[in-house]
Amino acid sequence: MDQSGLSVPFPETSTLEVGFSLPSDGSGLVVRDNVERHQFLLHTPSPVTPEPTDENQFSLPADAAVQIETDRLELAANLVVCIRDESGSMLAQVDHQGTEQFGVGTYSIELCGAVKTYLRVEGPVSIEATLTETILSLDETQTVIVGARSAHENPAGTITTTDDPLDVMKAVSAFSSALKTTSVERSYPTLRGHPPLLELGEELDIPDGLDAPDTGVRLELPPTLGHIFVATPLAYYLGAKVVPGDTPRLVTEDGFVHSFDGPHGFEESVARALKRTFFLDCVVRTEGIYEVELHERQTVESRIDIDVPSLYDTPLSERLEAYFDVRFDDIADLIPEWKLTTHVKPQTDNIELLPFVTNDLAVVRTPSGHEVSHSEVQAASVDNFLRDDIVRSAGTTTQSETYVRPSSSNSVEQAWVSDGTPVGASKTTTTAYQNRLQRKPTMGDIDITVICNDQQMSDETDIVDDVYGTRDGLSFDVDAHYNLSRAELRTVLAEPTDFLHYIGHIDDDGFQCRDGKVDAQTIEHVGTGAFFLNACRSYDQGLALVEAGAIGGIVTFSEVINSHAVGVGRTLARLLNRGFPLQTSLDVVRTDSDIAHQYGVVGDGGISIVQTESGVAVFCEVEHQRGDLYEMSYQAYHTSKAGIGSLIMPVLPGDAQYYLSSGDLSGILLTEDELRDFLALEQIPVVYDDSVYWDDEFLS
């Protein structure tokens, strides 16, 4: 069922990465990222006819371009607009509320929306941003060039390596060949390319063209896989060469040395070094391409003696020395919550995983945690409901799994690449990341498939009409299937779709169908990108879907009660429909569900089904203080559009500062009217009195 009405894209104006299509009334242009499945609407006063044109007409790179005739563009709110002259020099930036006018001349305009979009126009031109829309006005109808660039990054090549640690050191030293700059701007996610892939072979082979930058920085490490795994993301970010040494340390060409063998231990010292250099790069870069009022810079400058302007032009080795002169405790509370900690067992089988955890700029640790009993995973309330409610199991289950809770980390997400079933972390595999890279670009609607294989569980299927596809400006195709046979289920699982939501029974033998069971381990290929198996003990079947081609999904560890599962299913569906990644969606659900700890993620927990409205996934907690005064905390989660290093500007009264994304803004005091105005800007989940709300109804 089509729930938006965007027309078929123009084949002649599309590439594999990006494309253009018309909205249903023809008045405007829909810019599409075919890989990341994002869409961005540029509305015009009257219908337009796009024609393909040269994409090399902008001051920044584009993948494809079209030209249209118009005198006005109406754009979404929550948009940052950067205006540059023909040479690429920044003239102005317009964000949530503001107006800029420019005279005669040629301008390159960058629209930081759901898809990176560029305009080339002739002035005079004016840009006006309000809380509800952004409008670009021209003096008269003219040819406007519209270009777009996909956010997707493909590795530039594949390095073959043996499992000899000395070879692995040389291989990961080439990862920094993917950096687009070694300046502080590398802290922007778009300027960090995907590292080359690794493939195990009989000898080391680094293809021509994968040349690491000469930064004069090296990491000396004992030649063990454990040391190499932990230090690889730092080496990539710094453009450092990894070489054998007796003592783990960072060394620059100017003789500066920083030891990783201190009181915090090797792994924590490396993690702090990564966070320190990355964070201070984010502070210093405000002197560069994007000169913004950054909250973290102002706070750092109020605490310590730091010369930001001079550091911007300082060579890397000298800058690192200045960074490490800063006490970590002086900045620790300002460093945004890290996106990902990955616990990786240092063994040969996991060498090929390194490019992917490095691309996420993850903190890497060797696995540590404690075993969790099955009774802790299984909700205590299950026994109380067995007589009165449905259990989503097909009947045959075992309890042989070993559950492990990873040691705590200061990260939004945790991933586990080791033995056992992780609780509170995603169970990821190299295959999941490879599936994401190999997924082919898809033009057209966002496809969602819902399967309900038990009529008694049909209460959850109201998500078909009430949740999935209910996003203005996005084009969805939602298909629902009921009571499938084994053959029908296999057929549906093989069909390409962006997301699969399964409702029914699962046990050790597979998915329950009307004529038997289907074991996902017998399926060679599935077409879904992400999935949610809302059934009992769906963990093993979910892992099998990942091995068969899926990227990631939400599964259950044990039996789940139907009435509780329906609530979890509806809340998760709403979060996923708003653009929350899998793992962070589950974290939000845990705030108001007694059984959410029975759910986990397999594969890549960072995948999202659709884009968010403002680039990041926003989650707020509200507490009533007194009278009409409320206190709010604001949490912005990373997405594929807004990775670590992105900027946010919450629309809050009296606050025009930028913040680093994934930071927790707490202690925000708002009146009831101010809170209502804020919640009206975008539909976001709000926790109030331990329950999740989607509007301001809790204020009634």
Image (cartoon, helix red, strand yellow):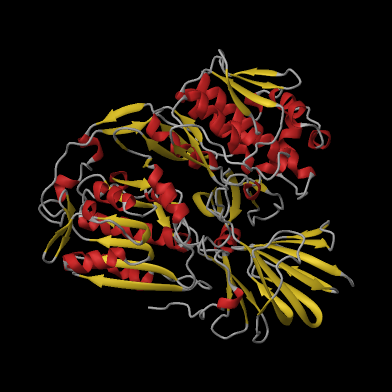
- Quadrant location, the N terminus: bottom left
Q: Is residue 270 left or right of residue 408?
A: right
Does residue 387 appear in this view? yes
| Residue under the image location 72 percent in, 19 percent down | 256
| Residue under the image location 67 percent in, 62 percent down | 62
Quarter assignment of residue 255: top right
| Residue under the image location 44 percent in, 34 percent down | 351
- Above or below residue 349? Residue 387 is below
Quarter assignment of residue 87: bottom right
Quarter assignment of residue 226: top left
Could you say which is closer to the camera, residue 331 or residue 345? Answer: 345
- Above or below residue 315? Residue 531 is below
Residue 164 placement (x, y as % from top left): 46, 25
Residue 645 placement (x, y as % from top left): 62, 44
Does residue 452 appear in this view? no
User: In the current view of this chain or complex, which residue is farthest to the top?
Assistant: 246
- Above or below residue 540? Residue 318 is above
Q: Is residue 187 left or right of residue 442?
A: right
